[in-house]
Image (cartoon, rainbow, N blue to C red):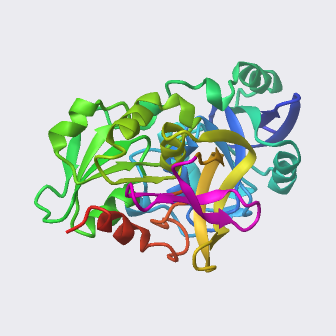
Amino acid sequence: MSDAYVAIEGERVVEGRARSPGTTRGELVFTTAYTGYEESLTDPSYEEQILTFSYPLIGNYGVREERFESDRVQPNGIVAREMTDDVADWLSEEGAPAVDHVDTRDIVTEIRDHGAMKCGIAAGPDATREAALAELAQCRHMSEHTDIGAKVSVAEPHVVNPEGEGKRVALLDCGAKGSIIESLVERDAVVHVLPYDASVDDIESVDPDLLFISNGPGDPENFEQAGEVVETYVEELPIAGICLGQQVVANALGGETEKMEFGHRGVNQPVRDLRTDQVVMTTQNHGYTVADPGEKLEVTQVNVNDDTPEGLENDELGIITRQYHPEANPGPHDSLTFFDDVLGLAGD
């Protein structure tokens, strides 16, 4: 007898086994990554989502805190074909509802056919179909989560590597993965991590060499303050961005963004550089993309599968952004030189 229910938009209910009890709701998405489940489960970009793993076994190399990208599990709920006890126990400790013994191939196919959908989960000894459907009924579209930045950003500014002798980076934390900050620190940068809604005065007090807009969850149009900061500094400082950061920069400089049908989430997304014609494999996690870069930004890299912009640049203004995650945690290391290029924008 089932003790877990996954209610999907359209009121279809899938039964499974409860691995971490509770009720929750969120946007149902999938990742094709076959490793890196610890990194995915702690990636702030999954806030307000139900993460489905297409790979059939999650947990086959345990759970190690040193691989975490943040200090908590970020998806609202988790769906898998089979989940080990290590992962299930971790999710239970974190209070993140999780379900397995589900045909995830079927769910992934449905998402690919119909796009990311609203979802409700009820799991545990008292779970019912009705409870899952009630969660589904209360689920909101991602664009309606106007306060999502506050859920994933630091509350107060802090400095990472204060004794460093490299560039001073003002990083707007819109839901930054820890490995992005680590990648900058490895290059001796002094990283001032600021809240997603930091003011121009906050950034001015840091006296940075570079403005960096991080990855994060949700609709980039809901990060208005970050966009205003970009507008202010566009001709004053070099600017870089990753994932949501690329979208925020594009919107701020006259471009447009849009919701994708089911997004890019995985560690094997091919990206072609239009200047060199080189193709690299990348890690990605986003549901929005740049529809129009505007007149100030040049598209320098595109996704091989659907031609969506993966890199935007303006050499004269010192702007470089990437839609994928160059820090590659998890994923291939093809694009790690991005951080060298970013810090190089700040000059000597």
Q: Is residue 340 above or below residue 82?
A: below
Q: Position of residue 271 (x, y in %)?
A: 64, 69
94 left or right, relative to 339: right
Total numbered labels: 0
Q: Position of residue 147 (x, y in %)?
A: 49, 25
298 in the magenta segment: yes
114 left or right, relative to 334: right
Q: Position of residue 216 (x, y in %)?
A: 49, 44
48 left or right, relative to 252: right
Image point (60%, 48%), residue name: 293
Image point (70%, 50%), residue name: 263
Q: Is residue 188 above or below residue 294?
A: below
**Which residue is at the front of the view, 308 or 314?**
314
**Screen quadrant of the C terminus:** bottom left
Image point (84%, 57%), residue name: 105
Image point (58%, 75%), residue name: 275
Q: Is residue 300 above or below residue 101?
A: below
Q: Position of residue 322 (x, y in %)?
A: 52, 59
Q: Is residue 43 above or below residue 28?
A: below
**Which residue is at the front of the view, 27 or 288?**
288
Q: Which residues are magenta?
A: 295-321
